[in-house]
Amino acid sequence: MKKAAVAWVSVGDGPATALWCVPLEGALFVVSGPGEQSAPGLAEATGARVTLRGDHGGRIVTWPARVTRVTPGTPAWETSAPLVAAKRLNASGPTADLVARWAADGCALTRLVPDGTPAAGAELPDGSLAEVPRDAPVVRTTRKPFRLHRVRRR
């Protein structure tokens, strides 16, 4: 968990969503809301299911998590939010400005703490759980490559 940068988080019976996260103090911290990533239902949830994957995309562990929202102005916010903001990639401006924007815009800083035993190897499915891609009207036929001159075959 301490090397995680992305976690798949599902709330209730909803689908798992890939979320940027920061491992800190034995928990994963996730920021969502206006101007940040979308995490449907996570800010209001009390529990979630977290799946972490390895460097090559294979599932390492799935565990139940207790979800708590860190509110601005609390001691937990004052210690955690700057550390999470420092790890935020492509953040515009200094860390203090980012933390102030999160508080002003109503962004949710949630803390995911392991709550129970991780799924054992026998409980994990053998398949990849990959879904068939959905049909889309944007599919185009591939044209033949352009040739500037005639190619002779000998």
Image (cartoon, helix red, strand yellow):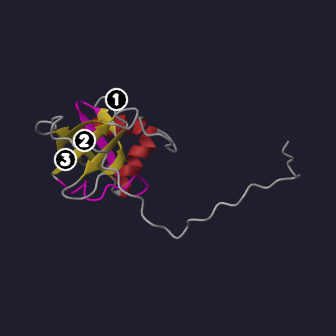
| Residue type, numbered disc 1 | Lys
Residue named by callout 3:
67
Q: Secondary structure at mark 1?
A: loop
* Neighbourhood count class around disc 3 (C-alpha, 10 Å): few under 14, some 14–19, many 20 upward: many
Among numbered discs 3 and 2, the one appearing first in the sequence: 3
Furthest-front residue in this view: 154
* Residue 100 coordinates in the image, percent (x, y): 39, 47
Tag 1 and tag 2, C-beta contact below 8 Å: no
Distance between the Cα atoms at labels 1 and 3?
Answer: 20 Å
From where the camera sits, is residue 93 visible? yes
Residue named by callout 1:
3
In magenta, the rendered stretch is 24-45
Q: Is residue 118 magenta?
A: no
Distance between the Cα atoms at labels 3 and 2?
Answer: 28 Å
Residue named by callout 2:
126
| Residue type, numbered disc 2 | Asp
* Neighbourhood count class around disc 1 (C-alpha, 10 Å): few under 14, some 14–19, many 20 upward: few
Q: Nearer the viewer, residue 25 or 121?
A: 121
Tag 3 and tag 2, C-beta contact below 8 Å: no
* Residue 22 coordinates in the image, percent (x, y): 34, 37
Identify which residue is drawn at 39% across, 52% down: 37
Q: Secondary structure at mark 3?
A: strand
* Residue 91 coordinates in the image, percent (x, y): 49, 43
Q: How many marks?
A: 3
Distance between the Cα atoms at labels 1 and 2?
Answer: 25 Å
| Residue type, numbered disc 3 | Val
